[in-house]
Image (tube, helix red, strand yellow):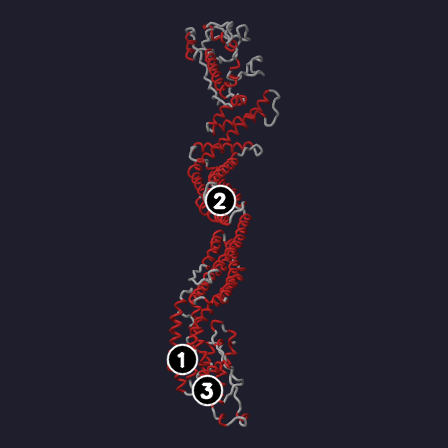
Amino acid sequence: MPILKSLGVADAKVPRAGTLPLRSSRNPFEEAPGLDEEPAELGTLPNGTSYRRRATLEKLAGLAPFRLGWSPGRRAGSPGDGQPRSFLGRVLTPGIRRSSADFGLLTRFQGTRAQGDQEEAGEAARRLAFLRLGRGPKPRRASLAERVVPAGEAAPEPPPKVPEPPKMKEPLSVLEILSLIQQRELARADEHILELEAEELASSGGGAPGPPGPEGAGAGRRARDVALLYEALQRELWALVRETLAGPGPGAGAVAQLGQVLVQEEAADGRRGPGAARRLRARWAEAVARAARERLEAAAPGAPGGLAGQLEALRARLLEDMAAVRGRLAPAYPAGLGAFGVYLRGYHGALAEWLAASARRRLPLADRYALLHWHKRVYPREVLGLVDMVALENGELGPLLSPGTLRGLEDECVTDVKVQTRAALLRVLQEEEEQWGSPEEPACSLAQDVCELLEEHTERAPLISQEFGQRMAHCCLGGLAEFLQSFQQRVERFHENPGIRELPPDSYISRTIALVNCGPPLRALAERLARVGPPESEPAREASASALDRVTRLCHRVLADLLFQELQPHFAKLMRRKWLSSSEALDRIVGTLGAQALALRRMQDEPYQALVAELHRRALVEYVRPLLRGRLRCRSARTRSRVAGRLREDAAQLQRLFRRLESQASWLDALVPHLAEVLQLEDTPSIQVEVGVLVRDYPDIRRKHVAALLDIRGLHNTAARQEILAVARDLELSEGGALSTPRDRAFFSDIPVPRPPFCLSLPLFLGSLPLSRLARPNLACLPLRPRPPSAARPRAQR
């Protein structure tokens, strides 16, 4: 009774306990007639009593709204038809979910709401306890009905057991779903959100307008609930993406739930249709890209070393994160999502944005080189090369930078290199030229400095791309050609300066050798750049080679002039009578050449060999010159034999000298022996053979040189002379003579000889010349013109 009073039914008539049915086939929660209402049909209990006076707990306590289900026999006036249910009724009734008003109250009164929920839950529990009292006796009392059956009567068959319907899964409220999201039970929360979304779609009737009353307002609240829950769910999902990349905090279970949510939502998108699809999988890829961008931006700014240091920090962060994805995150996702490929594309896209932003800035030349090299070499080899590219769905990633951006960076590099190297090369040349006039021992580093300036660019550019390497080689070769032309002009001014000749000879020679030594490394650099560069680099290569050749020839000529100025007094003693009996002059020549060769050893191999070959040629020119000028006249076979023997001895001595000096001009070794053979041979055919060999091996020999040899040996027979000279003339005309002779193989062209004598007929001068003079054999042939004073001077000295 106290309970009934508390429920407001103190005045109700309650039947005695004995009037309650011992067993009832009806649900005690079904509606039954009240105390003052006559039922349409009266029933009896198994013991014969009627339940006319039986009252329902619903009528007694007015608790019909707490009914657990809808009853088809409910009266029209009972609560539920158009009447709002109480809050507890909504909680306990299956299929009825608390509305978004609860969600809003939670957000506004989080503290008081929790306490109010506890009080309401307690009140509901007390009411449920009272309801259990009205359900009648427990099933075990059903046997009492059999005891009251009169004796001799068969007990009635028990009613068949009806299987209870499966318990319906109680739907969660919006607040409970939100709580699941906050507790990171994401897969379960997503399932309930999908159920709530299905209810919302069902209530909307497939697009039909809802009722104008509270039902329509409830459908709108459910749509807002779904939207708010999806926002909260996505916030947790993308926060989980960031946290799992930052460290091993959330475990594999959380990542697995994230993947399960994506699978569930993708399946739901198939049911929703294209217009209503939420595309959480695409948003997941975007969240991965955002997280990757944050990770890369956090790694780059603190790296030392400029852009190169930042790129190295990015490489380390990429490898670290992709290792975590491959080992820890990707296995936790469902296989169908292709998680590794999504993460790799996210990092690739974030890196592309970072590099594009860096390329738009005005970078120094070194930073542009670093950016291009990292893009072309480091990233494909040291990042993507260590990543499992098979995990990608289409197996390929796009470029980090567009072709236009790369071309722009390369153009800027080429322009900067052209400007910077030109200024740097001129500065180096100016500093080097200031030291040329110093009497101190030179320490020439011009070639080394130039090569270092250009090789810095020509070695880095091909590592980026072959095309960029060709463009950079062409640019550097053009700058080198300009530098070498300026270098040639300054070397010429240096040697033409009269004040330079006042330097000590050793200092002047050392400086000249240092200038020559600049040639080989610069020539090799020009050749290498021409090979790497495009075909249009050939004119620049030729200009560079021409400038270096002029510098080398000029310096060689200067050194040779200095040496032969010292040797000239000794060459003046050759081809005289004393020379036939003494080798003193030639010994002095050989000794001086050998001593000067020690200083020439400081020259690079290539110019040294060219200089020694020139010295070899010039020494023989100076040796043969007095012979062809007619200092000696052989009037007998004995004299011709002595002269030929002496020539052979001197040729052997000179050959030994220049072999020791490593001369490559071996074509000069047979010259003097051939001349000796022409002087010594007696028969005309043998002389013709030797003359033919001379013309073949030394194409620049002329008939005047052969005539001078015939004069020295004393051959005055006109017919024999014509036969011998005809051989020289025929070979000269057939092979083109000196026109086809290269400069380094020219010999006789540097030896002038007197004009050939003109032979007069005796009858013309019989009356004008005395017979005593005509009897002299040396007047048989007279020169056409008087000899110049320079040609007559040696004879006067002799």
Circle 1 residue: 647
- Label 1 SS: helix
Q: Amino acid at mark 1?
A: Leu
Q: Is residue 607 visible?
A: no
Where is residue 677? Give x, y as percent. 42, 82
Q: Amino acid at mark 2?
A: Gly
Query: In percent of the image, x 52 and y 31: which residue is there?
Result: 268
**107 and 4: which is toward the camera:** 107
Q: Nearer the viewer, mark 2 or mark 3?
A: 3
- Label 2 SS: loop
Between discs 1 and 3, the one toward the N terminus? 1
Q: From mark 2 to mark 3, how far is it between C-alphas?
A: 94 Å
Circle 3 residue: 715
Circle 2 residue: 395
Q: Nearer the viewer, mark 1 or mark 2?
A: 1
Disc marking residue 25: none
Count neighbours of disc 3 (C-alpha within 10 A) and say few if under 14, some if 14 to 19, many if 20 or more.
some
**380 and 213: which is toward the camera:** 380
Where is residue 88? Give x, y as percent. 51, 17
Q: Is residue 144 above or below residue 69?
A: above
Q: Are marks 1 and 2 in contact (CB under 8 Å)?
A: no
Q: From mark 1 to mark 3, how far is it between C-alphas?
A: 19 Å
Image quadrant for the C terminus?
A: bottom left
**493 and 706: which is toward the camera:** 493
- Label 3 SS: loop
Count neighbours of disc 1 (C-alpha within 10 A) and say few if under 14, some if 14 to 19, many if 20 or more.
many
Between discs 1 and 2, the one toward the N terminus? 2
Where is residue 453? Give x, y as percent. 48, 55
